[in-house]
Image: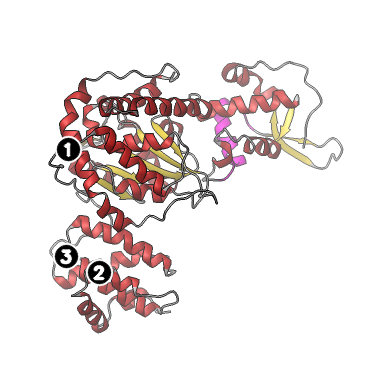
Amino acid sequence: MRDSRDDMTGDGENVDAKAALLADTANPLDVLRALRPGSLPEDAYQAVRAWAAAVCEMPEVERVTQTLLARRLLRKHGISSAKTLLDAAIREAEEKAGLEEPATIVESAGAARPNPAPWPDPVDGAKLLDRIEKIFRRYVVVEEYAYPVLTVWVAFTYVFECFDVCPLLFLRSPLMRCGKTTLLDGLHCLVSKPLGTSNITAAGMYRAIDADKPTFLIDELDSAGRERSEIRNILDAGHHRSRARVIRAKSSHNVYCPKALAAIGNLPSTIVDRAFVIQMKRKGQKDSIRRLNLSRLLDKTESVRQRLVRWAEDNGDALSTVTPKVPKEVKSDRARDNARPLLAIATVAGGDWPERVSEAVVALSSMAEQEVEGDVAEVLLKDLARIFRVSEAKRIDTQVILRKLARREASPWPTYSHGHPITREQLARLLKPFGVKPVKWAGKSRPRKFHRGYTLTDLRETFARYAGWTPPHSPHPPQGK
């Protein structure tokens, strides 16, 4: 196979021919659709260059949409480095066209999809929300309570400036192929000024927010790498208007804007605590949903976005002054803060939406209390205390602890490690701040076989302080396996 860089700098005769064929084609993606699985690499590279020649002078927003669809087409044809290939093709096409400021395919500041002109007539809020909910039900499988939350959060992205709290939307998937990316695509077609990405830096977020106040749609946040802690700081700070400013040595940035995040497994507890957590599900045999075609849905939802813009303009004052009633079952202050904007929108929209959203936020609050009781370390200590209390052991092998934690379906441990069960390294890291470390001991029946785990003696004080359980001083014989 020839190197793609060699192909990218060839004479371009075949590319020019393909580009000429595109001149009368409405959609530049047609040249990529013409490829077939098993196509020669040379054919794929030439098709990509022809595509790039057709889109390089498009407006930024159209180019971003074209790129998202092009990546998927290339991946279907087995080209794993689609992003790199498309980036190189765009740069080459821009240089050939003589553009002064080449733009990369990475969505930069100003690349958010703009909002359309408002709908000319007044809009019935309840009917508009009904229509949005039907779109979500058509394409994704989530818990029943999640549909009204997703629907009203879409409306929230158009009116977030009316509120002091900007709750995150966290699409949590236990495994791959559970629909989180499909749901992000659905949101891209509906929210205000969508800006989708699966690879962004903290500096990129600052610039994008300064330029557009977009709705971020961030995929694969669990694999953000070295930037993860910095992005986490932005997400945490952007939750409340009064604290939504990040200060650097030579600059200051307001990071208050809507953000939807998608990841496999859990995210840090500070993010989860600021978010509506939507648990994704893989499609079952009895689930009747359609395959989402992004380009078609973008066209179909344009009138929905127009109505959302008009409804936001007409109801801004009402949203700023309404005081919704938060259900008493929502106990934590953070959860009540998150619920108020959605309840306010539902109240102003009318219909049965106030009742439905109230029920949804109660369900979300109940789930959050089970998952995050202050901090993930506190959850671990309570689960670990339960394991020791039930087993009545004075020391337990690490592997036994990990197996028992992985069986706790209502906890974060089954998917804690990027969709997989918590590891012994992660267990040790969470317990280290409490001064608890794993120890070794010889097996009772096989003295030469050593176990490594945790003892009740080392955990006794920690359990008493943080887990609400004071262990007895004369436990039963040890459980080594």
Disc 2 secondary structure class: loop
Which of the two residues, 230 or 67, is positioned nearer the viewer here? 67
**Disc 3 residue type (three-letter):** Glu
Q: Is residue 292 above or below residue 251?
A: below
Residue 271 location, quadrant: top left
Span highlighted in magenta in the image: 420-437
Label 3 close to label 2 by CB (< 8 Å): no
Q: Is residue 124 left or right of residue 352?
A: left
Circle 2 crowding by C-alpha within 10 Å: few under 14, some 14–19, many from 20: many
Which of the two residues, 436 or 378, is positioned nearer the viewer here? 378
Q: Dot 3 corresponds to which residue? A: 57
Tag on residue 106?
A: none
Q: Position of residue 220 (x, y in %)?
A: 41, 48
Circle 3 crowding by C-alpha within 10 Å: few under 14, some 14–19, many from 20: some
Q: Nearer the viewer, mark 3 or mark 1?
A: 1
Q: Dot 1 corresponds to which residue? A: 310
**Disc 2 residue type (three-letter):** Pro
Q: Is residue 145 above or below residue 456?
A: below
Q: Is residue 461 left or right of residue 361?
A: right
Circle 1 crowding by C-alpha within 10 Å: few under 14, some 14–19, many from 20: many
Q: Dot 2 corresponds to which residue? A: 28
Residue lying at 29% horizontally and 61% vertically, measured from the top left: 67
